[in-house]
Amino acid sequence: MITFVTNTNDMKVTVYPVRGINAECSIPSSKSHAQRVLALALFNPNKTEITGIGQSDDEQVLLKIADKLAYRVDQYGEVTSIEGIRDISSLTRPLEISTGESGLATRMLTPMLANFHADIIITGKGSLLTRPMNFFDTVLPHLGVQVTSNNKKLPLHIKGPLQPKSYQLDGSQSSQYITGLLYAYATSPLLRECTLQLENVTSRPYIDLSIATLRQFGITIPFQDDTLFFTSPAQLSPTTVKIEGDWSSASFFIVAAALKGKVTLSNLSKESKQADKAILSVIRDFGATVTINENLISIEKGNNKGFEFDATHCPDLFPPLAVLAASADSVCKIKGLGRLASKESDRATALQIEMGKLGIRIDTDHENDTMLIYPGIASGGTVSAHNDHRIAMALSVLALSASSPVTISEAESVNKSFAEFYDLLSETGVRIEKAP
Ligand SMILES: O=C(O)C1=C[C@@H](OP(=O)(O)O)[C@@H](O)[C@H](O)C1
Ligand SMILES: C=C(OP(=O)(O)O)C(=O)O
């Protein structure tokens, strides 16, 4: 058993502008990698030893679920040892599971839990309750699962077991459902030879990350021509996994460096499958210098050139890139706007409103799926994070180049992915004041 710490609420943070930064920073764990590893460890009857699970709410919620359902969970310093469920088909008692505020936890675990023979209620909190879950009503009944939802949103009520079979899936809304079905099939005792044929794939690297993480448990699922190929049931292997550093979290420090000086980052893998590693190509287009030296990645400010970028497959880069774009020497264009509406906030609107309060103009063109960001110097002021961690972090980085301090409300939202964000930012020399 593990003791869980609850994070504080309603925090206002004031971030002061800086003349320059020159810092080293170790980037904490990737919640995307950690959540996948924890989900697979839960379904692995063999022992999984995991190093480096982080403090983010999204990781902790998955750990809590694993702690509740796994045969055994132990913690030794940095290492979490999990012996997962021994016999899926024996799980028949009714269950209620909360996936907190995590879209991935909900969309990945719902089909996996549908492998049980039990009545299961899946609940969540905060912004998650307003996010679409219609995929489950549409798809799971075709796979033998009874589903009732709250008007295509949480809470969901499911009753399996899921019967894997060949199926065509639309991935235009989210890749997370595909990760969910891929993992549900891969861990199903009822698996037989079949395919999942994907259409309109978005956030593609996240599917690659799911496949790569499954491989860390000894299971290879071929993926060709947007088709996943499954054969007969196979057991996950005993394994030892180190959680990767998070490129999405790193993107905020990378943008801070490109705007304000130099930052050297450790604990990031350049071989990672994470989508947001794509930040490196944009930052180079912007004119910053990127130096990769074994495990250290340095970013240094250059000239601030305007850029165009398609973020359809890495939508979490929109907030940091909008901030980067505001300091470019010309109007910048980011494509993939439609991917932002159902995140923790409507991120296009949140960026437009809040950056607008500080004098930065953003136009959204929904017909052409693009956002235009106009260059300008942000003023100081008070803004809201819209209870969205990536909006809080983006506005904090924007404050570094503002003409006076910026106060961000709902700044505690950073805990969802990057609980250490303000501590690390202050270690780079930025003045930060927190008020409860
Ligand atoms: O699989 C994942 O870890 C994620 C996939 C992406 O979601 P979509 O596939 O819905 O774009 C991303 O935005 C989210 O933060 C994490
Ligand atoms: C959208 C995000 O996560 P999730 O969908 O897993 O809640 C995110 O981290 O930006």
Image (tube, rainbow, N blue to C red):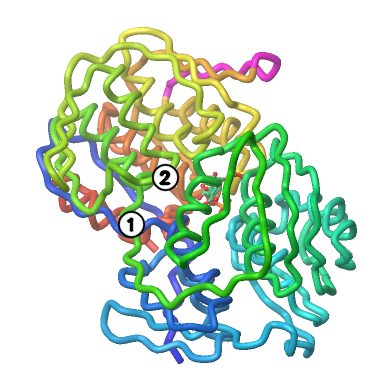
Residue drawn at x 49%, y 75% as measured from the top left: 63
Query: From the viewer's perspective, is residue 302 above or below residue 198?
Result: above
- Residue 158, x across and y down, in percent: 82, 70
Query: From the viewer's perspective, is residue 360 above or below residue 195?
Result: above
Give, as a three-letter code, the residue at label 1. Glu
Residue drawn at x 29%, y 44% as measured from the top left: 15
Q: Nearer the viewer, residue 117 or 369?
A: 117
Q: Residues within 10 Å of mark 1 (few under 14, many from 20)?
A: many
Q: Nearer the viewer, residue 243 or 148?
A: 243
CB atoms at circles 1 and 2 under 8 Å apart? yes
Q: Is residue 412 visible?
A: no
- Residue 74, x across and y down, in percent: 40, 89
**Quadrant in the rendering for residue 150:** bottom right
Q: Residues within 10 Å of mark 2 (few under 14, many from 20)?
A: many
- Measure the C-alpha gap from mark 1 to mark 2: 9 Å
- Residue 329, x across and y down, in percent: 31, 9
Quick check: 271 left or right of 226? left
Give, as a three-letter code, the residue at label 2. Gln
According to the picture, the residue beneath numbered tag 2 turns out to be 274
Residue drawn at x 72%, y 64% as measured from the top left: 111
| Badge 2 element | loop
**Quadrant in the rendering for residue 403:** top left
Q: Is residue 195 visible?
A: yes
Query: From the viewer's perspective, is residue 227 above or below residue 85?
Result: above
Dominant SS in magenta: loop
According to the picture, the residue beneath numbered tag 1 turns out to be 244
Residue range (magenta): 359-368
User: Quick check: is 402 in the magenta stretch?
Assistant: no
Q: Nearer the viewer, residue 428 or 342?
A: 342
**Quadrant in the rendering for residue 319:** top left
**Precedes in sequence: disc 1 or disc 2:** 1
